[in-house]
Image (spheres, grey):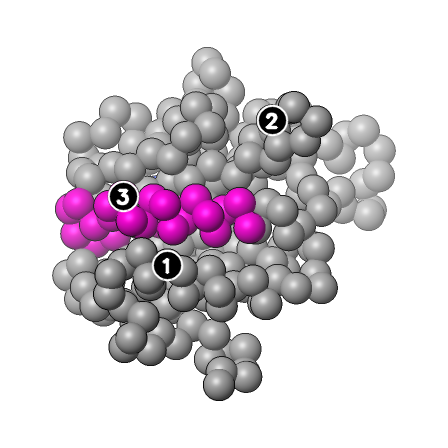
Amino acid sequence: MMSQHADSALVPTCCTQPKSQFWEHVFSQLAPLLEGQRDWVTNLSNTTTLVYNALHSYPGFGDGASSVNWCGFYIDSSLFPTPKIRMDSAASDPQSRMLLGPFCGQPACQFIDTSRENGRGVCVDALLSRRTVLVPDVESYPGHIACDPNTKSEIVCPLILRSSGEEVGLGVFDLDCLAQGGFDDDDKAGLEKIAQLVVDACDW
Ligand code: SME
């Protein structure tokens, strides 16, 4: 029985194959971690560290040449708390962009421009298309933004809030891998389910 929060990221051997079972296990560990909490900073923080550490327990994704080297969120800047010292209109960010949110891995770009004129990269494409983007080789992806030159493949899943027939793009969940072709359709399905859980668990 896993009772401590830190134990949530442990992956018993029985839950590593097939990979879909691994993602079901991670999902089942995440749900209780989000319970009773509606703040997105807190929930996204626990989500990144759970997914990152669980992946490091998964054969192939652990330390080594095919390690997941980054796992985190970029969130629309309008959703960040307004600094209390600047409660006037100047406090709101006039630009279309996502800011770096909770993550695990090396330091990354502070923000990503999401304007249709200047926006580029995997995160913007996932946000604007509202679809998960799987990139087997980042070097051949047009517009890819390289935060870490060691990254070889990437998957970005959009966070979409659906309410009364409307859809709002909140941000993205982004994972990088040191190997080419690091992510597959099982990862896509697992991450999309987690992204939906996180969206529903928070007040935006
Ligand atoms: N590669 C991303 C930028 C974010 S970093 O990978 C953390 C992109 O092309 O949008």
**Residue 189 seen in render:** yes
Instruction: Tell me the kind of residue under disc 1.
Output: Trp
Residue 189 lies in the magenta-colored region = yes
Q: Residue at x 33, y 63 (%)?
A: 22
Side (left or right) of 114 relative to 69: right
Q: Which residue is disc 1 drawn over?
A: 23
Residue 87 coordinates in the image, percent (x, y): 84, 39
Q: Using a 10 Å C-alpha cutoff, classify the residue at mark 3 as few (fewer than 14 neighbours), some (14 to 19) or many (20 or more).
A: few
Q: Residue at x 75, y 35 (%)?
A: 91
Range shown magenta: 174-197
Residue 129 coordinates in the image, percent (x, y): 43, 23
Which label number is shown at residue 167?
2
Q: CA distance from mark 2 to mark 3?
A: 24 Å
Q: CA distance from mark 3 to mark 1?
A: 12 Å
Q: Which residue is disc 3 drawn over?
A: 185
Q: Is mark 2 within 8 Å of ligand 1?
A: no
Quadrant showing the C terminus: top right
First of labels 1, 2 by sequence position: 1
In the displayed orientation, state which residue is furthest to the top: 117
Q: Are marks 2 and 3 in contact (CB under 8 Å)?
A: no
